[in-house]
Image (tube, grey):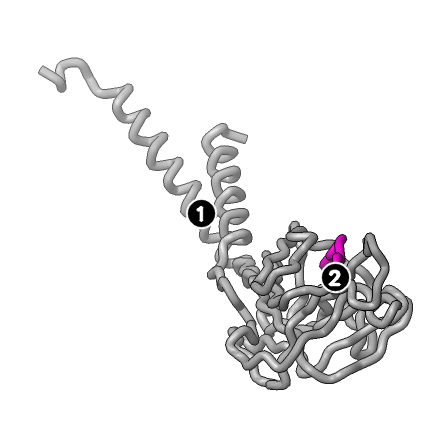
Amino acid sequence: MPRFILTATFAAIALFALFVSTAVHADAIVSNFDQTINGSGSVGLFFGGPITRGGAFTTGANPDGYTLNSVSLRMGAGSGVPAGFVVTLHSDSSGLPGTLISALTGNSNPFADGDYAYTAASVSLSPTTTYFVVADADDVSTPTNSNNFRWRVTDSGSDASVDGWSIADGHAQSFNNGGGWSSTTGALFMSIDATPVSVPEPTSLALLGLAGAGAMLRRRGGRVARRHVPINACQ
């Protein structure tokens, strides 16, 4: 195969990869941070036993899905000396947290009042699918009844969303480190940063390839023409 055709093919492939990875970025594709704070849910030790919490969100209808960038949690002031706060993403299992999908990276001691972001690494989300963000404290250094972090809760069921995303009105809690779950009231405060994935249609890819090949042909034709200009034509 001629070199210029190979070059055009590789250029088309590179353009295709750019189209796949490029999308409109939404800093908060869904969030309930504008709602009223009605309390907090303990994460860590609760009356001498462990407690884990999980809040659900459902993705929008973008056919090619989404890439999860980060999840932000609104936390209240903690109690005691909790440690080892971890955030993970799980599938949905009949309205409760299911299989672990990925750990999220962020502050392991969100003890002070504020919002804390936890980032994801190459996590793909399917369209119109429910997922759970789960928070746990896996290292309670001094077991006491009041040794916990506080994840803020709202009683409001509304949330600001893009593309049909939503956050569940209630949440899940576990008193045995995720070994068993139950539902409870109140939406956990969270904000999801995700990017819609956009894959071009096959016809778009074909047009890109033709455009790249045409550009290479024009370039090659110009070089050939310059090499064969008669000497007397320049006088």
Most foreground residue, 15 or 180 = 180
> How many C-alpha atoms fall within 10 Å of the one at disc 2: few (<14), some, or many (≥20)?
some
Q: Amino acid at mark 2?
A: Gly
> How many C-alpha atoms fall within 10 Å of the one at disc 1: few (<14), some, or many (≥20)?
some
In the rendering, which numbered label is found on residue 210? 1
* Viewer-side label of 1, 2: 2
Most foreground residue, 220 or 231 = 220
Q: Earlier in the sequence, mark 1 or mark 2?
A: 2
Q: Amino acid at mark 1?
A: Leu
Per the image, label 2 sits on a secondary structure element best described as: loop
In the rendering, which numbered label is found on residue 80? 2
Q: Is residue 211 above or below residue 177?
A: above
Quadrant location of the N terminus in the rendered image: top right
Q: Magenta region: which residues?
A: 80-87
Q: Residue at x 80, y 81 (%)?
A: 183
In this rendering, position of residue 219 left or right of residue 22: left
